[in-house]
Amino acid sequence: MDIPWLLLIYTVAAEPSRKRAAIWRELKKVGAPYLRDGVCILPERADTRERLDAIAAKVEEFGGEATLVSGARLSETRATALVEQFHAARAEEYDEIAREADRLTEHVARETEHRQFTYAELEELEGDLGKLRRWTDQVAARDYFADGPPTGLVAALDRCERALNAFLEAAAAQEHGAS
């Protein structure tokens, strides 16, 4: 597995800790695992370079030092282990989203059974589904070694959307019947 890698080597002062925490959050957001303290890695691509360049600039803005190493090569064993680490991290995130989608589907089903239809509830449920879809997009953006979300997650989101559409139809029928 001959993958070129980008390494971000950085230091940020320990105090105030909010600066270090901000960098840590940005690295987590892009899915960059630590090789050791202050050394993160991503596969080298145009989008990952852009992301790590932005984080390096933030480190320097915070008074720290940042070095971006391009074209790093790892042993076959280490590269394979890293790719597996990336897969495992994204699978965990996708599983969490699927569990939340299933919970939302169950909630919509309960609301539909109780015939408690309100416009505010519908808006809230639609917002919840939108959040799950945005979360999926965020995870997919850092899923560097896959072609997108797993089919099980896509199916869970689709079930959720179908349940929400059924809720909407029932709400509309109730509203129409009440008029």
Image (cartoon, helix red, strand yellow):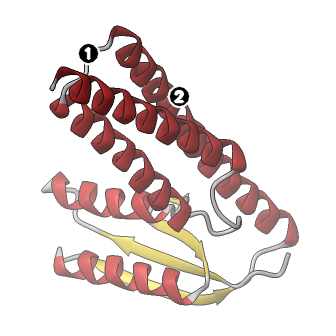
User: Tag 2: Cα neighbours inside 10 Å, few (<14), some, or many (≥20)?
Assistant: some
The amino acid marked with disc number 1 is Gln
Q: Is residue 124 left or right of 88 when viewed as pictured?
A: left
Check the image and report above or below for 61 versus 88. below
Give the residue displayed 48% in from the left and 32% down from the top. Answer: 163
The amino acid marked with disc number 2 is Asp
Picture coordinates of residue 161 (x, y %)? 48, 41
Indicate the quadrant where residue 169 lies: top left
Give the residue displayed 25% in from the left and 59% down from the top. Answer: 22
Picture coordinates of residue 75 (x, y %)? 82, 73
Mark 2: which secondary structure?
Answer: helix
Closer to the camera in the image, 179 or 135: 179
Closer to the camera in the image, 97 or 35: 97
Seen as rendered, the residue at the extreme top is 114
Give the residue displayed 65% in from the left and 57% down from the top. Answer: 86
The tag on residue 147 is none
Indicate the quadrant where residue 57 lies: bottom left
Report the residue marked by disc 2: 102
Image quadrant occupied by the C terminus: top left
Check the image and report above or below for 134 versus 9. above
Check the image and report above or below for 5 versus 31. below
Image quadrant occupied by the N terminus: bottom right
Give the residue displayed 43% in from the left and 28% down from the top. Answer: 104
Dots 1 and 2: beta carbons under 8 Å?
A: no
Check the image and report above or below for 148 versus 89. below
Report the residue marked by disc 1: 116
Picture coordinates of residue 140 (x, y %)? 55, 62
Q: Is residue 168 left or right of 96 when viewed as pictured?
A: left
Q: Nearer the viewer, mark 1 or mark 2?
A: 1
User: Tag 1: Cα neighbours inside 10 Å, few (<14), some, or many (≥20)?
Assistant: few
